[in-house]
Image (spheres, coloured by chain):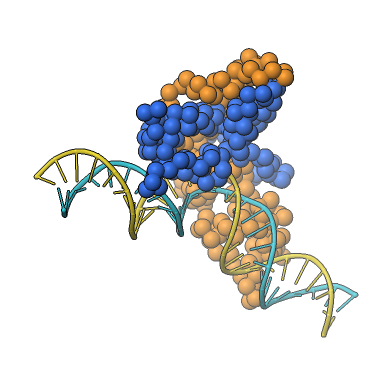
Chain colours: A orange, B blue, C cyan, D yellow
Amino acid sequence: MSGAVTIGGAAKATGVSAKMIRYYEETGLLPPADRTASGYRLYGEEDLHTLRFVRRSRDLGFSVEDIAGLLALWQDRRRASAQVKALALHHVADLRRRIAELEAMARTLASLADHCSGDSRPDCPILDDLAAGHAPFPPRPRRSKPPSR
Amino acid sequence: MSGAVTIGGAAKATGVSAKMIRYYEETGLLPPADRTASGYRLYGEEDLHTLRFVRRSRDLGFSVEDIAGLLALWQDRRRASAQVKALALHHVADLRRRIAELEAMARTLASLADHCSGDSRPDCPILDDLAAGHAPFPPRPRRSKPPSR
DNA sequence: CCTTGACCTTCCCACGATGGGAAGCCCCAC
DNA sequence: GTGGGGCTTCCCATCGTGGGAAGGTCAAGG
């Protein structure tokens, strides 16, 4: 029980910046931290554990909203693993969708670049394509889960 | 020369929303549009062409800043195609980097999900991994070009 | 001629996750 | 008791996009 640290210590110990720790508290992802008499936030081992959980989840690309769900499941020892799996697979599908989008862009652009001489002459199939815009704009797909980070 | 339309018509004709057309003008990507006596913006064929160029570039994932560069090259009939190609290839590299990041997340998460029974029992390797966070947080890579859209 | 409705204008607000920085308090070591 | 580093709150910026309010404009139809 030695272990109550202030926000800077928690940041160093978990890899979550002090700014973000306050933000997570403010937005309700984390419960209000205990405070010293003078108002400093204090974090015990369990809080640090939670923060590491959040950090790892962010690294896996979960939105803060998703993490709220994960945290709730984590803390409910009676959860069904099916719920967790569903959340995870949903996120995987989302990642794959975003990957496919980016790959389509990269492929198109790479092939355009491939046909561009890339010398001092002005002729450029890349610009020609952008100007022609032969794909008649289907309403640009709005991503349900913007990448955000 | 029949063709001067107001902003709504330009939006329909190019797939760029009226909001965004105003935004592009405000931020200097596009020059101020002509106005009617009563202040309505007017767009001729050439303006529509430019808007389609912008739209297509956004579809290929270019940032608005990048598009400013592309537009300048497009409008400079003496540009060297090498410049355009460099811009495009740089963007492709960026896309590939983002793809790799997302793929790493997807792989990790998919393999975790694969080991999760996904039934009514509470045991869940996904949560276990998030809680363990065995990867000792290397400072989270800040993307030079955030995905943004 | 006047109303109605569709369009346009500007202005402000919001998102999501993050960082920057200012002004002011707190605490410890010297 | 003083200096420096950590903490607090508060505001601002990012990027591209949409929402909406308040008010002007315009054409068609009664």
The image quadrant that residue B10 belongs to is top left
Q: Is residue A28 above or below residue A92?
A: below
Q: Residue placed at 72% from the left, 19% from the top?
A: A120
Q: Residue placed at 64% from the left, 62% from the top?
A: A43
Judging depth in this view, the residue of A108 and B131 nearest the camera is: A108
Q: Position of residue D29 (x, y in %)?
A: 14, 40
Q: Position of residue B114 (x, y in %)?
A: 54, 30
Would residue B74 be seen by someone viewing this image from the given angle? yes
The image quadrant that residue A119 belongs to is top right
Q: Position of residue A97 (x, y in %)?
A: 50, 29
Residue B118 left/right relative to A11: left
Task: Classify the position of the C terminus of chain A by image quarter.
Answer: top right
Residue B96 left/right relative to A142: right
Would residue B103 be seen by someone viewing this image from the given angle? no
Q: How many marks?
A: 0
Judging depth in this view, the residue of A23 and A60 nearest the camera is: A23
Judging depth in this view, the residue of B42 and B68 nearest the camera is: B42
Q: Residue placed at 49% from the left, 48% from the top?
A: A65
Q: Residue placed at 54% from the left, 24% from the top?
A: A130
The image quadrant that residue A104 belongs to is top right
Task: Classify the position of the N terminus of chain A by image quarter.
Answer: bottom right
Q: Is residue A76 above or below residue A107?
A: below
Q: Position of residue D23 (x, y in %)?
A: 33, 58
